[in-house]
Image (cartoon, coloured by chain):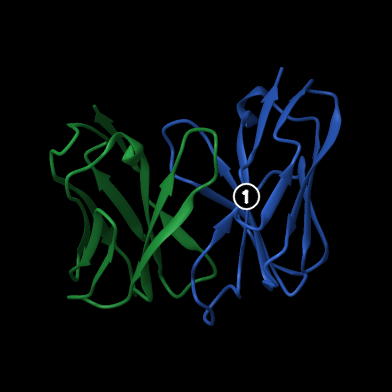
Amino acid sequence: EDQVTQSPEALRLQEGESSSLNCSYTVSGLRGLFWYRQDPGKGPEFLFTLYSAGEEKEKERLKATLTKKESFLHITAPKPEDSATYLCAVDNYGQNFVFGPGTRLSVLP
Amino acid sequence: ETGVTQTPRHLVMGMTNKKSLKCEQHLGHNAMYWYKQSAKKPLELMFVYNFKEQTENNSVPSRFSPECPNSSHLFLHLHTLQPEDSALYLCASSQESGRVGTGELFFGEGSRLTVL
C-alpha cells in the first residue's frame, strides 16, 4: 500500500533558526512529489513539485530536495510568517495524490 | 486568491438536514476534486471529476452526493450526516487528473462543516 509519512509532527523554531522537515514515501511508482503550505482555516497552497532524485527547488527561505525514498524541506533563517502546516503529497501514477499528515511549524519571534 | 472559490465557508447542520457545498474554479482546469480534512489525519480524497465525468469515488458513504454540471462547478450534496462527518471539506482543481497533467492541485479555502 502506498504511504507517505512526515516528521516531525510539530516543530517549534526561534526566528532565524534553520531546520528541515522530512517526507518519507513508499509508493509503487513516483511521478512527482509535491509540497504544500497550509495556514489555519485555509486550503493548502502549492509550493514545489519534484520529479526525480537529486532535484532541488527553491523559493525564498525554502528549499526542497528529493531522494529515492524521501524529500526534505529545508527552511533557512525562518520568520514568524513561515509558521504553517507543511504537507507533502506524492503522485503515484494513479487517479489521485497520497498526502502525508503534515508537519506543523511554529516560528517564534 | 487561488482561483477556486468555495461557499459557504462555515456550515452548521443537524443530522436530518439537507445542505449543499459549492465550488467554482476560474482557472480553466479540467479536473475537480473533493477532499475531506479531519483533525490530525491526512487529506482524504472523496471524489474526482475529469471533464465532468466522475473518475473516482473513494468508498464515500452515500450520504455524500457529488454533482459536476460543467468543468467549472462542483457541488457536494449532504443529507442525514453523522457528527463524525464534521470536518473541513476542500475543493481542488487541476489541469487534468490521472496519468496526464501537471499534478499541481489548486485548493479553495474550504467549507468548515459541523454536524450536531
Q: Residue at x 60, y 74 (%)?
A: B95
* Element marked by disc 1: loop
- From the viewer's perspective, is A79 left or right of B102? left
User: What color is chain A drawn in?
Assistant: green
* Foreground pick, A16 / A96: A16
Number of numbered discs visible in the structure rendering: 1
Quadrant (top left/top right/bottom left/bottom right) for the N terminus of chain A:
bottom left
- From the viewer's perspective, is B109 left or right of A10? right
Task: Tell me where residue B2 sits by quadrant.
Answer: bottom right
Q: Residue at x 69, y 73 (%)?
A: B30
* Foreground pick, B60 / B92: B92
- The residue that disc 1 covers is B108
Can residue B86 be seen here? The reply is yes
Is A74 located above or below residue A55 in the figure? above
Task: Tell me where residue B12 sits by quadrant.
Answer: top right
Is A34 located above or below residue B76 in the figure? below
Quadrant (top left/top right/bottom left/bottom right) for the C terminus of chain A:
top left
Residue type, mark 1 in image: Gly
Q: Residue furthest top?
A: B116
- Could you say where residue A101 lies in the image, as x and y percent from the top left? 37, 43
**Which chain: blue?**
B
